Image: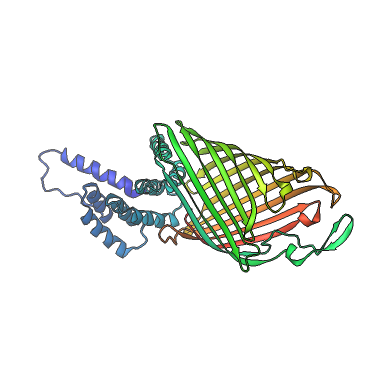
């Protein structure tokens, strides 16, 4: 940005003036713009004088990017990190590709101790047009974040209209053992409006030079009127993490429990081996392999060991956009063969910070599930193909104590060779999130 080069110009001009010929009158003055004067005052640590000058600049032009940047710089120097973060974000609302603003925003988050947001902003800045020396400095910050980050917290709450809150078929009858049976209304597609909330976090203290502990939990709940389709899942994990220069690996014990209609539904306990590579890179690659012993309280025949593996890759394309790719495979060994299955899925994602403070994301996914044996009641072996399309939109200019409004829409269509398992679903959520 031009005011950064202006600061360097002031310093060079002052150095040259001091070295001029002694015959030059000692009273020579150097003309400075108001912006240059504020830069010089900040460099001289005369923060109150700089603040008064920048206040006058903002009074004349409230949305001037240079003045906002200077005021944010003053706020950082005075350790008013929340104020600085808000000011940097105001600039990015109009200039989402401004690398230098993202760098200073990332540094403000880092100094505040908000390492998740610092990591995100440093990665965006690193993808910009910056020189190798700055990239090396960013990499030092990313490596430090991986070691220093002790707390990761997330929270969201939203109003959740749903066209198929029980993920059921819209068919009115189904053939069982070759005979037609009418489906009860409760077993068919039901629409409604719910309240969705998600809260979670991880504590990861440093235990040694390259060993951390990881202890995390998450609670997700969707509640509908009447409670017939309420859905809640609690999950937790814990174990050691080993840190290396550009990658890490974790060995975790895992567990979860899910309630549907406020009754026990399914639970599991097991373990997972996970790792990430590219801690200091535009690419971040993750992989995991896990297994759990699953108990299904609704349909006990579906109980048994569940094996999962997943591969993900994230690439930061620019200071305002990133791309993600995910692949996965599941294998369930149920008590009876008709409920045992193998499933594969793959998906992608693209997110972009847009002008006027908007951020948009699109995540398509496709799932293929094949069961082992025929369901006698239906006379065939079940096979499902599911497509899921997710769209999110939020506006970063509305930032209240770290929360911003978010709209999301998820469309799901499952096609099964057994009609009772086919359905379509549209889920909407309008609420607040702390992840942006």
Residue 160 located left or right of residue 396: right
Out of 416 and 78, give the one closest to the viewer: 416
- Colour scheme shown: rainbow
The answer to whether residue 329 of the structure is visible from this angle is: no
> How many numbered badges does the structure rendering display?
0
Looking at this view, is 22 or 303 the one in front? 303
Quadrant in the picture for residue 225:
bottom right
In-image side of 33 versus 376 (left or right): left
On screen, residue 435 versus residue 2, left or right, reads right
Residue at the right extreme, as displayed: 178
Query: Which residue sits furthest bottom?
Result: 225
- In the depicted structure, whether residue 280 falls above or below residue 218: above
Residue in front for this viewpoint, 105 or 1: 105
Q: Position of residue 359 (x, y in %)?
A: 51, 55
Could you tell me residue 65's position as x and y percent? 37, 56
Q: Residue at x 10, y 45 (%)?
A: 26
Residue 163 percent coordinates (x, y) = 67, 64
Q: Residue at x 54, y 41 (%)?
A: 315
Residue 173 location, x and y as percent? 83, 63
Q: Nearer the viewer, residue 67 or 413?
A: 413
Question: Is there any visible trace of residue 313 in the rendered image?
Answer: yes
């Amino acid at each position: 940005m031009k005011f950064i080069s202006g600061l360097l110009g002031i310093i060079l001009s002052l150095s040259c003036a001091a070295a001029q010929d002694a015959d030059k009158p000692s009273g020579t003055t150097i003309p400075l713009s108001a912006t240059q004067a504020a830069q010089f005052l900040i460099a001289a640590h005369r923060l109150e004088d700089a603040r008064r000058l920048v206040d006058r600049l903002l009074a004349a032009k409230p949305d001037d990017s240079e003045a906002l940047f200077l005021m944010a710089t003053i706020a950082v120097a005075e350790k008013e990190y929340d104020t600085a973060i808000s000011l940097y974000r105001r600039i990015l609302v109009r200039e989402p590709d401004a690398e230098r603003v993202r760098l200073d925003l990332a540094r403000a988050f880092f100094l505040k101790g908000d390492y998740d947001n610092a990591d995100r902003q440093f990665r965006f800045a690193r993808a910009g047009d910056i020189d190798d020396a700055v990239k090396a400095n960013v990499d030092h910050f990313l490596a430090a974040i991986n070691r220093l980050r002790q707390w990761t917290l997330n929270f969201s709450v939203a109003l959740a209209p749903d066209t198929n809150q029980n993920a059921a078929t819209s068919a009115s009858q189904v053939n069982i053992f070759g005979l037609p049976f009418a489906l009860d209304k409760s077993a068919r597609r039901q629409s409604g409006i719910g309240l969705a909330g998600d809260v979670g976090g991880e504590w990861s203290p440093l235990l040694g030079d390259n060993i951390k502990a990881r202890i995390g939990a998450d609670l997700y709940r969707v509640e509908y009127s009447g409670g017939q389709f309420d859905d809640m899942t609690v999950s937790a994990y814990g174990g050691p993490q080993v840190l290396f220069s550009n990658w890490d690996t974790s060995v975790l014990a895992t567990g979860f429990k899910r309630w549907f209609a406020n009754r026990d539904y399914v639970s599991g306990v097991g373990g997972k081996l996970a790792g990430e590579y590219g801690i200091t890179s535009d690419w971040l690659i993750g992989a995991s392999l896990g297994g759990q012993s699953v108990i299904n309280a609704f349909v006990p025949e579906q109980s048994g060991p569940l094996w999962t593996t997943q591969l993900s890759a994230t690439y930061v394309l620019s200071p305002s956009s990133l791309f993600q790719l995910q692949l996965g495979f599941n294998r369930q060994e149920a008590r009876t063969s008709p409920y045992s299955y193998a499933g594969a899925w793959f998906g992608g994602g693209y997110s972009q910070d847009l002008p006027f403070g908007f951020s948009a994301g699109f995540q398509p996914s496709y799932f293929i599930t094949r069961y082992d044996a025929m369901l006698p009641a239906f006379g065939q072996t079940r096979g499902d193909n599911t497509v899921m399309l997710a769209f999110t939109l939020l506006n970063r200019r509305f930032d209240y104590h770290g929360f911003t409004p978010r709209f999301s829409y998820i469309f799901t269509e499952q096609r099964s060779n057994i009609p009772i398992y086919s359905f379509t679903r549209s889920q909407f959520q309008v609420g607040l999130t702390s992840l942006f």
